[in-house]
Amino acid sequence: MLESGEKYQRISIFSPLEGLITVMFRRSRKSPNQIKPDLFDSLECTLSSSSRDVGIPFVRECRIVLKRSYLALDHRIFFAAAEIAKIFLHNGIHILDSVDHYNLLENSLGSLGRGHPQATRIKTLYLFAKLEGLPVKQAWFPGLNQNLQSKARFILGSSINEDSNFEDAEQILESLILWLNSETELKC
């Protein structure tokens, strides 16, 4: 959220229909019960554009569908959520088919509530790259040694829950980020 004058905040949202968009959200001093979206909340918004139909749309109505306050309870999980959001913020403007990406974002933020932030980030980056048509399986995966390939295969094929043991997730994540930053146009 960016302050944009006394009455408005500029907010970036990721929509299943339009992808990454920036909107203006009116702050009301008179209404203490006004909905105030928080970072990582899922919202349902009705937008209205200016009479000239140019510029940034305004949020006319807004409803919080899902609050994710649990993401702020653990520093590691909050950091992972911010890194996941950053992927969509830096790369979301170029996405043509945003429904699958929106579902990935929603699932990733939900997975963080079950623990293992590094494993969630690995899965998110891997699936994001696949959705973008990048040869992540053919080009990145073979570059891992046999031990890390086995552990990466386990992470990518497993459901994330508190009982899972994802060894070497940090090393696998660093390798994937390095590959994406050096071999692709994604910004991680």
Image (cartoon, rainbow, N blue to C red):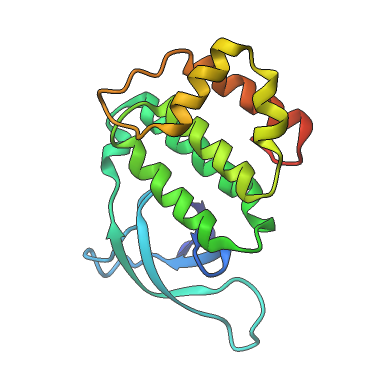
Q: Quadrant of residue 159?
A: top left
Nearest the viewer among 136 and 178 is: 136
Quadrant of the image containing the C terminus: top right
Residue 181 placed where, x, y %?
A: 72, 31
Q: Report if residue 103 is visible in the image.
A: yes
Residue 134 placed where, x, y %?
A: 70, 43
Residue 62 placed where, x, y %?
A: 35, 70
Determine whether 140 is above or below 125 in the image: above
Residue 123 placed where, x, y %?
A: 49, 35
Determine whether 41 is above or below 30 in the image: above
Nearest the viewer among 141 and 160 is: 141
At 66% across and 63% down in the image, what residue appears? 96
At 43% across and 37% down in the image, what residue appears? 81
Q: How many marks?
A: 0
Determine whether 76 is above or below 33 in the image: above
Left or right: 149 in relation to 161: right
At 52% across and 23% down in the image, what residue appears? 152
Q: Report if residue 11 is visible in the image.
A: no
Determine whether 120 is above or below 61 in the image: above
As drawn, the residue found furthest toward the left would be 33
At 65% across and 74% down in the image, what residue appears? 55
Left or right: 102 in relation to 39: right
